[in-house]
Amino acid sequence: LMVRYVAIAALFLAGCQAEQGFKNTEDAIGEPAPDIEADPLFLAFPTLAAGDIRTETFTVSNVGSSVLEVANIFIEDGDPFALVTSPLDFSLAAGDSRDIQVSFTPLQVANGGSAVIQSDDPDEPEVYIDLTGGGAVPELVIDPNPANMRTQYIPCSSQKTLELTNIGPE
């Protein structure tokens, strides 16, 4: 019966710790460990015209108790976004932070991607920053797409009508 109460108390304390945002800054065997934190986890760029550029910043921090090694930061699935800050591999002492700048140049009406931070944090080796931005750019729709022209033999020819529509705001 006593084991049951100890188990319930442990679950209660773990849940309370998670709700309050407390983190363990030690690894599984009680040694000091790095602990990555990124803020904000979402960057929303404003709607820009074609060719315009906007830069926003997120911060990478080490809230752990030993040095955090950031191995790499890269953009995943987001061609209109680029990392401005360099180098993208660095060390952060406990309590230190570094600002990372991301630029945005719209390629289409809706743009999205992620900045991925890879580090030696034992419980969170990758952190994702979601990136979005709007583009006031032309956007072409072709109908039908694809246009099936069927096999043609010389000297025969065929015609197909295609409709080209700009659905973008520019």
Image (cartoon, rainbow, N blue to C red):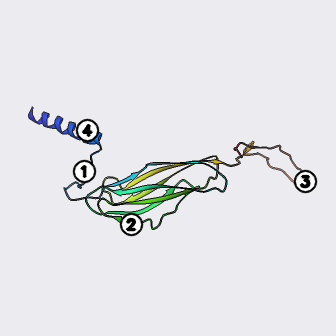
Q: CA distance from mark 4 to mark 1?
A: 13 Å
Badge 3 marks a residue whose secondary structure is: loop
Badge 2 marks a residue whose secondary structure is: strand
Say which quarter of the image contains residue 166: top right
Whichever of labels 4 and 2 marks the residue nearer the N terminus, that label is: 4
Whichever of labels 3 and 2 marks the residue nearer the N terminus, that label is: 2
Residue 99 x, y percent position in the rendering: 43, 59
- Residue situated furthest left in the rendering: 2
Whichever of labels 3 and 4 marks the residue nearer the N terminus, that label is: 4
Q: Residues within 10 Å of mark 4 (few under 14, many from 20)?
A: few
- Residue situated furthest top in the rendering: 1
* Residue under pointer 4: 15
* Residue under pointer 3: 155
Q: Which amino acid type is marked by label 1?
A: Asn
Q: CA distance from mark 3 to mark 2?
A: 66 Å
Q: Which amino acid type is marked by label 4?
A: Gly
* Residue under pointer 1: 24
Q: Which amino acid type is marked by label 3?
A: Pro
Q: Please name the residue shown 47% across and 67% down the image.
A: 86
Q: CA distance from mark 3 to mark 1?
A: 77 Å
Badge 1 marks a residue whose secondary structure is: loop
Q: CA distance from mark 1 to mark 2?
A: 23 Å
